Amino acid sequence: MSDKQIIGCIRIDKEPATAEQIIHMENTGADGVLLIDNSMPVDEERLIKLIKAVGEKSDLPLLIRRHYQRLEDVKKILYAGDTRAVMSVVSAADFHLMVEASERFGKEKILAWIPESQPVTDALASVIQKNGAGGCVVENKDGGVFEAYHLPVFLIRNVTDVGEIAGILKDDGAAGIISEKFYTEDTDLMSLKYALGDMGIATNRFQSRIPFSEFKLNSDGLIPVVTQEYKTGKVLMVAYMNEEAFNETIRSGRMTYWSRSRQELWKKGDTSGHCQYVKSLDIDCDRDTILAKVVQIGAACHTGNESCFFTNLVSKSYDTTNPMTIFDEVMQTIIHRKENPKEGSYTNYLFDKGIDKILKKVGEEATEIVIAAKNPDSDELKYEICDFLYHMMVLMAERGVTWKEITKELAGRH
């Protein structure tokens, strides 16, 4: 049985939404978010900016329901991030565009939109399947006919009762449930998933591959936990778990420790708001230490520092450059200069001159690389590549392209 998906929903044509609000749903257990924009005309720039802002800090898939009139509309949405286009199927023109989009981008990227006013019939299911949709988002309550066509169906149902949700998801044709009511500050979708699991409905939730009973504990019955930021690898803190804390971490998806001083469970962030959301838990070869990779909200240390490890004891001179993060660091400096201009800055000079000047410099530096590559001295080539990369990052910043988007695209081609 495949996992049933729990998907949040925001009607962004009716209420403003921020990337932080959407990412909060991911941190609390959402498998995706449906963004609905039925406004005419669509504020495309605002929508794409929101998608990109989510993608910079999150791996959450977004389903985008809007009015698609041209293939270019679909392309802009699919190229903006980890997205699926949710398309109308009312007219012949709609189906023609769906076929084009499916052939161009793959049917797994295309979902059909069935509004509440549109009857769900066997004939409709058949024609949707033949015209390239990889699944359907259905407002109409009569969605059972899609099961025979092996189309994943995501049902919009604004319910919160676990029993009602379970009744909906027990239908073999239901791939998941979408609800605007999942979009609240206090929604605990991980708890919902565990309640559904107790009712025999499989969802994407944490389950430890090794029971706590097989861990090697200290004399107090505790296991140390080293916690690091999942993207940068920076060590944030060290704390301890007992079995209850470990089980609560697995259940909630939030780091929960055992406070040795207070002798009680300590869910990180309950008082400070500086929560830690689990990305992964690993155990070492001796099974006596856990490594937790987390999304850190705010500061990890009670002093307000990002990490508890901010006091140096001894050190010697060494190169602190991290080749895995240097591109992001340089890009952040360029973006900061764009947003906060500084007199005399060459970067600001390029931004002030505009896209044509930036493109001219990128072209010139690319030519310099070709010339330098003919020189037996590789130092010159190294310098020219650095010049090119800098100007390319200015171009990326000017056009709103991030390194995450570039590396994700490269990874997809690998």
Image (spheres, rainbow, N blue to C red):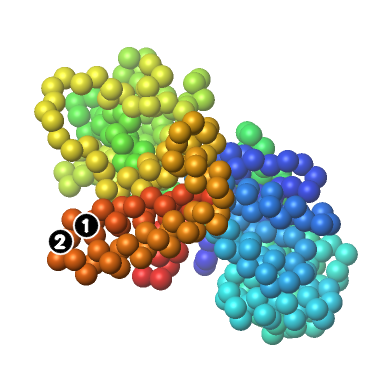
Q: 264 or 22, which is in the foreground?
A: 22
Q: Residue at x 24, y 41 (%)?
A: 321
Picture coordinates of residue 263, whole percent (x, y): 36, 18
Q: 332 or 348, which is in the foreground?
A: 348
- Residue 373, relative to residue 49: is it above or below? below
Residue hosting label 2 = 377
Tell whether label 1 touches label 2 (CB within 8 Å): yes
Position of 402 with respect to 302 (left or right) is right
Separation of marks 2 and 1 at Cα, in angstroms = 6 Å
Position of 328 with respect to 47 (left or right) is left
Amino acid marked by disc 2: Asp
Q: 50 or 170, which is in the foreground?
A: 50
Q: Residue at x 37, y 22 (%)?
A: 305
Specify the quadrant that holds the C terminus: bottom left
Q: Residue at x 66, y 44 (%)?
A: 182
The mark found on residue 55 in the picture is: none
Position of 118 with respect to 353 (left or right) is right
Q: Is residue 393 visible?
A: yes
Picture coordinates of residue 79, whole percent (x, y): 57, 63
- Residue 402, relative to residue 102: is it above or below? above
* Image quadrant in which you'd find residue 71: bottom right
The single residue placed furthest to the right in the displayed view is 117
The mark found on residue 380 in the picture is: 1
Picture coordinates of residue 351, whole percent (x, y): 53, 45
Picture coordinates of residue 254, whole percent (x, y): 46, 36
